[in-house]
Amino acid sequence: MEVETAAQTQPREQQQLTSAAGADVAAKPLHRNPRLVLSFFLMVVGWACGPLLLRDYFVHGGNRKWLSSLLQTAGWPILIAPLIASYFSRRRRSTTTTPVFLMSIRLLAACVVVGLTTGLDNFLYAYGMASLPVSTSSILMATQLAFTAGFALLLVRQRFTAFSVNAVLLLSIGAAMLGVNGGGDRPAGVTRTEYYMGFGMTLAAAALYGLIVPVMELSQAAHLVRTGSAVTYTLVMEMQLVIGSSATGKSTITPW
């Protein structure tokens, strides 16, 4: 009869804890989670309108790329109000001392690093938008799916599926065809050098954001393993607040 040691049982317990947390989240129907539905809606609106507004700024004479990168995360103070409401809600329901913040020190540090990286990613994206039309930059940014899939495989061991492979191939072919086009869709007043600089900056922004997403997932998983606390909606809002404020601070202090 084999006896498992503590070192052997710990990974299994961590896996069971992660699986239980994931099953609890997946078991809740989407229509019963209005906050998640609202988040999806705002994300879709942001992804659709953000590039148009940013490109419109440059078309009408704007040239401050640092300001454009700052504005991409400047809305983080909006999260303060729901976080305060969440704290008082948890305080009313709890019979013990309610912590003001749910984040651990390690998760806080990870979010600061992710926020600084996001600030750099925003600058790269703003630089690309200044030299590329919206259609080209949107296709290039869509290639972040390929980078996300690759980094997710390396960092969180998320395997490729047939759907992800097809999407990666199609987006990669689209980006390659744009590169072969040789600047045929270059906006008026943009030199060939500026166009290719913007092309490269936008691809770099897609690659960097493709790294950010798996790193955030890895940070949440590590927090779950260390503390045993579930990754709640309030915790995610705290993470977004730290990431947004760090990225905005970085864009304010440094222009790149």
Image (spheres, helix red, strand yellow):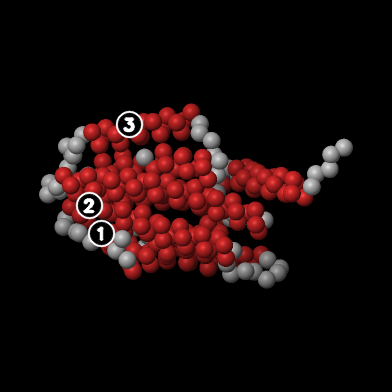
Q: Is residue 150 above or below residue 226?
A: above
Does the CB distance between marks 3 and 2 fall below 8 Å?
no
Q: Is residue 199 above or below residue 165?
A: below
Q: Are marks 1 and 2 in contact (CB under 8 Å)?
A: yes
Secondary element under disc 1, as helix, strand or loop, is helix
Q: Mark on residue 192?
A: none
CA–CA distance in space, label 3 to label 2: 24 Å
> Is residue 7 in view?
yes
Q: Nearer the viewer, residue 46 or 174?
A: 174
Nearest to the eye among marks 3 and 2: give it.
3
Position above or below: 78 against 230: below
The residue closer to the viewer here, 44 or 131, is 131
Element class at badge 3? helix
**Identity, as a three-letter code, of the amino acid under mark 2:** Ala
Q: What residue is at 30 percent from the left and 36 percent from the top?
A: 175
Between 202 and 243, the residue placed more toward the observer is 202
Residue at 21% of width from left, 34% of height from top?
Answer: 181
Answer left or right for 156 relative to 140.
right
Task: Measuring from the top left, give residue 96's x and y in whole percent.
Answer: 70, 69
* Quadrant placement of the C terminus: bottom left
Q: Given the current orientation, which residue lies at the most extreme left position?
A: 189
Q: Which residue is mark 3?
A: 173
In percent of width and height, residue 105 lies at: 57, 65
Q: Residues within 10 Å of mark 1 (few under 14, many from 20)?
A: many
Residue at mark 3 to residue at mark 1: CA–CA distance: 29 Å
Specify which label sits upstream in the sequence, 1 or 2: 1
Q: Which residue is most to the right?
A: 1
Q: Amino acid at mark 3?
A: Ile
Left or right of residue 106, residue 202 in this image: left
Mark 1: amino acid: Lys
Q: What residue is disc 1 on?
A: 65
SS at mark 2 in the image: helix
